[in-house]
Image (cartoon, helix red, strand yellow):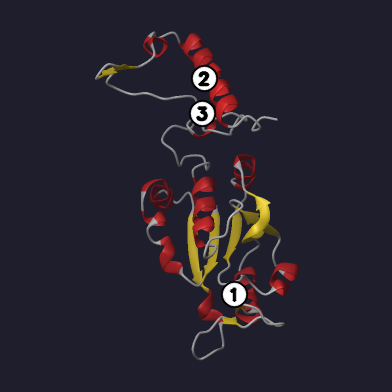
Amino acid sequence: MRIDILTIFPGMFEGPFSHSIIKRAKEKKLVEIHLHDIRDYTTDKHRRVDDYPFGGGAGMVMMVEPVERAINALKAKRKYDDIIYMSPDGERFDQPMANRMSVQQSLMILCGHYKGIDERIREHLITREVSVGDYVLSGGELPAAIITDALVRLIPGVLGDETSALSDSFQDGLLSPPVYTRPADYKGWKVPDILLSGHDRKIAEWRHEQAVKRTRERRPGLSD
């Protein structure tokens, strides 16, 4: 998989993409992540990429020209399965969407900033708008990092245990059951006996029961 991210703050991705699972996936060459500074595509001598909105109002808007130039420069080199714009009014990102997107070969993610991007970019160049929740952040960089992390961990070979991602919360419409590790007794806090029994079928049944119970208690509408 290849992911190209357009942003005016590429430095924001250095931490998330330089550690843990994403770092290992890049080292294994299972994913390519390329950051592109939109300021490199502006013709303004001060590298400005924003301007005042037509009609007045507070805030600034990312200009159409540098964003269009950046997107088309990348499109000239390869075909993208989707060109995604991170937006609070986009389609809500969830695990089923992550599963579908993880099998795509090439994605472009555009990170907005300020009051957003010129609407003409959304009308003519964006193929999908995605939101990570009903709230507003300062820009699309953090949501883009979230989506990248969610996709990369689903790529075969990224996780040490191929079945690990399949048992995550939301994969089967349920939250994950409780998990425990050693010691079995810590200050009187004990691990459920069933998990120490070695009986695989009963353990699987217990885990499913716990997942159903936790989902009903914490996210009752999740599997509706």
Q: Secondary structure at mark 3?
A: loop
Task: Tell me if residue 16 comes above or below residue 120 in the rendering.
Answer: above
Q: Which mark is residue 70?
A: 1
| Spatial CA span between label 1 and label 2 | 49 Å
Residue 82 x %, y %: 66, 58
Q: Are marks 2 and 3 in contact (CB under 8 Å)?
A: no
Nearest-to-viewer mark from 1 and 3: 3
In the rendered structure, the answer to whether residue 100 lies left or right of residue 155 reads: right
Report which residue position mark 2 lands on.
Answer: 210
Q: Earlier in the sequence, mark 2 or mark 3?
A: 3
Sequence-wise first label, 1 or 3? 1
In the figure, is residue 84 to the left or right of 9?
A: right
Decide: marks 1, 2 in contact (CB < 8 A)? no
The three-letter code of the residue at mark 1 reads: Ala
User: How packed is label 3: few (under 14 Cα within 10 Å), some, or many (20 or more)?
Assistant: some
Secondary element type, mark 2: helix
What amino acid type should be assigned to the residue bearing mark 3? Ser
The image's mark for residue 176 is 3
Q: Give SS at disc 1.
A: helix
Q: CA distance from mark 2 to mark 3?
A: 8 Å
- Give residue 160's quadrant in the image: top left
- Image spot of residue 209 (x, y percent): 55, 17
Name the residue at 47% across, 32% down: 164
- The answer to which of 223 and 106 lies nearer the viewer is 223
Q: Give the number of marks.
A: 3
